[in-house]
Image: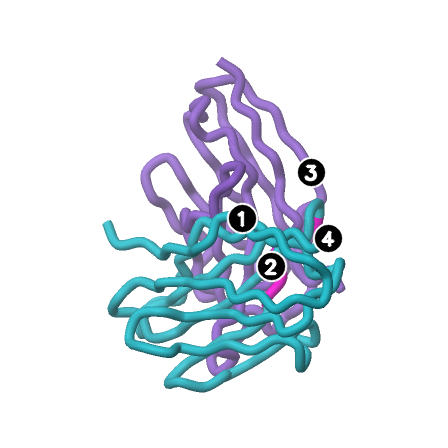
Chain colours: A purple, B cyan
Amino acid sequence: DQQVKQNSPSLSVQEGRISILNCDYTNSMFDYFLWYKKYPAEGPTFLISISSIKDKNEDGRFTVFLNKSAKHLSLHIVPSQPGDSAVYFCAAIPKIGSNYKLTFGKGTLLTVNP
Amino acid sequence: EPEVTQTPSHQVTQMGQEVILRCVPISNHLYFYWYRQILGQKVEFLVSFYNNEISEKSEIFDDQFSVERPDGSNFTLKIRSTKLEDSAMYFCASRGGLLYEQYFGPGTRLTVT
């Protein structure tokens, strides 16, 4: 049951360059999307989110793009910093009334090299 | 900055024993959740809790699992008779009333031997 897919298990980029993390979903009932960052031995930390009525949301170095027709979203980090090295999870919430439970992807390990 | 806390950080137990995992959600949050992550797998939803009752539970959350908010601050997950396959990281999360974002605790690593 892979309703949220992150097909790249890992990504390596150079410091200062752009990191692009991708996420696809299959359930058209998903209405809200979130990105979480996770360091080892810690819980997921909320990064940025986007509603299905938008196609872009920006917060500092982080921008999330949503292509609803393609059921695809991406997280752009620019410029990437070594401290961004972590596992990034894409998560989705169904439409209102669902208790807002999160459905996660498997995650992408981002490594930013100095 | 307010945060979700969880205790213990690591719990080792024998198969068949009962365990209670504890969480203190962010104080003004109204919605509470438990998730788990088996090593190498994705984070999975277990249960959501609102207004002192379970609002939704997954197939994983069978009769061996229960949740409780015994007072105004703690939120607990009990596993009555642990199995080997219950070994996982268990994350508690909470959410305020107006926002969708859930805030996670650091997790409890449960090891069942």
Residue A80, horizontal then vertical, whole percent: 45, 26
Q: Which mark's residue is nearer the viewer, 2 or 1?
A: 1
Of residues B64 and B25, the one nearer the viewer is B64
Q: Nearer the viewer, mark 4 or mark 1?
A: 4
For residue B113, which numbered disc appears in the image? 4
Instruction: Name the residue beneath numbered marker 3.
Output: A9
Q: Chain of mark 1?
A: B
Asked if the residue at tag 3 contacts the one at tag 4, i.e. Cβ–Cβ closer than 8 Å, the answer is no
**Same-chain status of marks 4 and 2:** yes
Residue plotted at (50% across, 75% down): B48
**In the image, which residues are magenta?**
B41-45
The amino acid at mark 2 is Arg
Q: Are marks 2 and 3 on the same chain?
A: no
Q: CA distance from mark 2 to mark 1?
A: 14 Å
In this rendering, does residue B101 appear at all?
yes
Label 1 CA crowd tier, 10 Å (few <14, some 14–19, many 20+)? some
Q: Earlier in the sequence, mark 2 or mark 1?
A: 1
Q: Residue at x 70, y 50 (%)?
A: B41
Mark 3 or mark 1: which is in front? 1
When asked about the image quadrant of residue A3, the answer is bottom right
Chain holding disc 3: A
Residue at the location (75% across, 59% down)? B85
Marks 4 and 2, Cα distance to the nearest angstrom? Answer: 18 Å
- Cα–Cα span, label 2 and label 3: 19 Å
Q: Amino acid at mark 4?
A: Thr
Residue annotated with mark 2: B36
Q: Is residue A109 left or right of residue B23?
A: right
- Mark 3 belongs to which amino acid? Pro
Circles 4 and 3 on the same chain = no
Q: Residue at x 50, y 83 (%)?
A: B54
